[in-house]
Image (cartoon, rainbow, N blue to C red):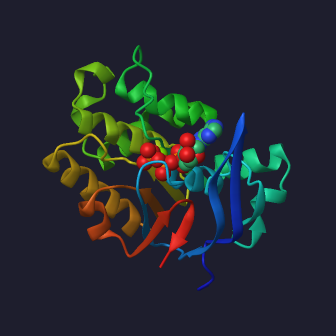
Amino acid sequence: MNEPIYRTEKLTKAYDDGYRTVALADVDLEIPRGSLSCIMGPSGHGKSTLLHLLGGLDRPTSGKVYLDGLDLSAMNANILAEVRGRRIGFVFQFFNLLPVLSVQENVEVAMMLARVPTSEHPARARELLGLVGLEDKLYARPHQLSGGQRQRVAVARALANDPDILLMDEPSGNLDSNSERELLDHIRRINQQGKTVVIVTHSPNVAAIAGSILHLRDGRLVV
Ligand SMILES: Nc1ncnc2c1ncn2[C@@H]1O[C@H](COP(=O)(O)OP(=O)(O)OP(=O)(O)O)[C@@H](O)[C@H]1O
Ligand SMILES: [Mg+2]
């Protein structure tokens, strides 16, 4: 039961578009189950790359990512998509909300993709939006929301498939400190409900609530 939820072994990712960029090199890490962990480091030093590999959105050039002992890097695309859809929620660096849909519809679209039965969508979308304090914005469109509220919609949407892992890339990147504090309160509560949360961040306020902090420099883990 105390097995870490994630373990990587010499995880390496190189991009090759004309010349070779080694974005991540030989990273060995463990992420404790149920933890709130954060990944820090300067811009361009491999944080998003690492998060995408943990989420099975991209494949390593070499090395391994184990989720509960299962090697994500060895799974075929269908199985990987199944694991991702069942276990992992993402909040990306930019909001990516659909502008023509209401807040509630943005969450319901994710449920459709996660194959949650349609009859459950409205109630469950409202429940998730309540969890992030947006019960009074169900019918608003994204452009009518503040940055912090939009980011909370993105968190609710990431929970549509009821994942046990929530991966977030700079969720509070362009928020003022009040909106950030509010977002962090919700994230902390979601973590306390048992979900493992991994946050890429530059923010010391996020780091302050994290149980473990990983620092990346030039694609390497620094201790
Ligand atoms: N798809 C890609 N093709 C080529 N190079 C890439 C690609 N994605 C990232 N890189 C390169 O890999 C390195 C690490 O990028 P990454 O996006 O992981 O950085 P980051 O730490 O998330 O930065 P930021 O804080 O600015 O978001 C950078 O040098 C970047 O230019
Ligand atoms: Mg990034």
Furthest residue to the top?
100
Q: Nearer the viewer, residue 176 or 194?
A: 176
At a point 38% along the width and 76% down the height, the residue shown is: 211
Residue 140 in picture, x, y percent from top left: 28, 22
Furthest residue to the front?
19
Residue 195 can be seen, yes or no: no
Image check: 42 left or right of 27? left
The N terminus, quarter of image = bottom right
Image position of 203 with respect to 37: above or below: above
Q: How many marks?
A: 0
At a point 49% along the width and 55% down the height, the residue shown is: 166
Residue 10 in picture, x, y percent from top left: 71, 70
Quarter of the image where ligand 1 sits: top right
Image check: 155 left or right of 146? right
Image position of 184 with respect to 21: above or below: below
Q: Nearer the viewer, residue 2 or 168?
A: 168
Furthest residue to the left?
178
At a point 31% along the width and 34% down the height, the residue shown is: 150
Image position of 63 with respect to 77: above or below: below
Residue 86 can be seen, yes or no: yes
Image quadrant where residue 64 sits: bottom right
Q: Nearer the viewer, residue 147 or 125?
A: 147
Image position of 26 with respect to 200: above or below: below
Q: Nearer the viewer, residue 187 or 74?
A: 74
Image quadrant where residue 215 sits: bottom left
At a point 15% along the width and 50% down the height, the residue shown is: 177
Residue 65 in picture, x, y percent from top left: 71, 64
Residue 171 in picture, x, y percent from top left: 36, 47
